[in-house]
Amino acid sequence: MRSNKVTTQYKLCSRCKKLIPLQRKTALCNECFKKERINYINTYGISDRKREADKIYNDNRYKKARTECRRRANGLCEVCYHFGHRKLGQQAHHIIKVLKGDDTTHYDVDNLVFVCEQCHKAIEGMDRDRLIEYLEEGKR
């Protein structure tokens, strides 16, 4: 009679040599990974820019604006829709960047466009004028 038991394969943590599941994405066990992360933060710190951005993204005003942006777009990527495609959006993109704006732009739904991941990568770094130009070029 054959057993239906699945066997787990293991590898060694590259630091302490404990056994960890082979499918684990990192080469470190949980304990070593935590130590490595703490060491990295202590050495390099968390950038002030990231800290500032995280503060904005976790603010209830931003969450409300993001929800309104998604509702306004009916959950669809606004860039894809502009080009005649119907694709679900996943992210709210700031037209005026978080780190360049202020409280008037961070939480303004008119400064957000709801996009899919692919379009977000394509338009990231574009200012308002370049984004408009990009959308107009695609319509031709």
Image: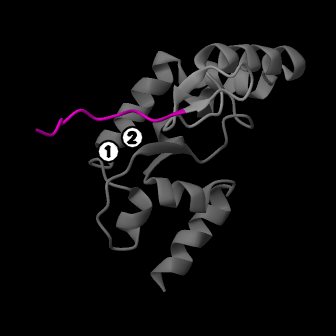
Left or right of residue 71, residue 21 in this image: right
Q: Position of residue 74 (x, y in %)?
A: 26, 48
Instruction: Say above or below: 83 vs 117.
Output: below
Q: Position of residue 62 (x, y in %)?
A: 49, 26
Residue 28: quadrant of the picture: top right
Q: Which residues are magenta?
A: 1-10
Q: Residue 49's quadrant in the figure?
A: top right
Place of residue 68 in the rendered image (x, y in percent of width and height, measured from the top left) = 35, 35
Q: Estimate the spatial distance between the alpha carbons at disc 1 and disc 2, rounded to whole Å.
A: 5 Å
Residue 107 versus residue 91 in the image, above or below: above
Residue placed at 61% from the left, 29% from the top? 104
Residue at the image position 69 percent from the left and 54 percent from the top:
125
Left or right, 103 with respect to 87, comes to: right
Q: Residue at x 72, y 29 (%)?
A: 14
Please name the colour scheme applied to the rendered image: one colour
Foreground of the two, 103 or 52: 52
Q: Position of residue 60 (x, y in %)?
A: 46, 17
Q: Amino acid at mark 1?
A: Arg
The residue wearing badge 2 is 69
| Crowding near the residue tagged with mark 2, few <14, some 14–19, many ≥20 C-alpha atoms within 10 Å | many
Mark 1 residue element = helix
Instruction: Tell me the quarter of the image containing the N terminus.
Output: top left
Q: Majority secondary structure of the magenta segment?
A: loop
The residue singled out by tag 1 in the image is 72
Amino acid type at circle 2 is Cys
Q: Residue furthest bottom?
A: 140
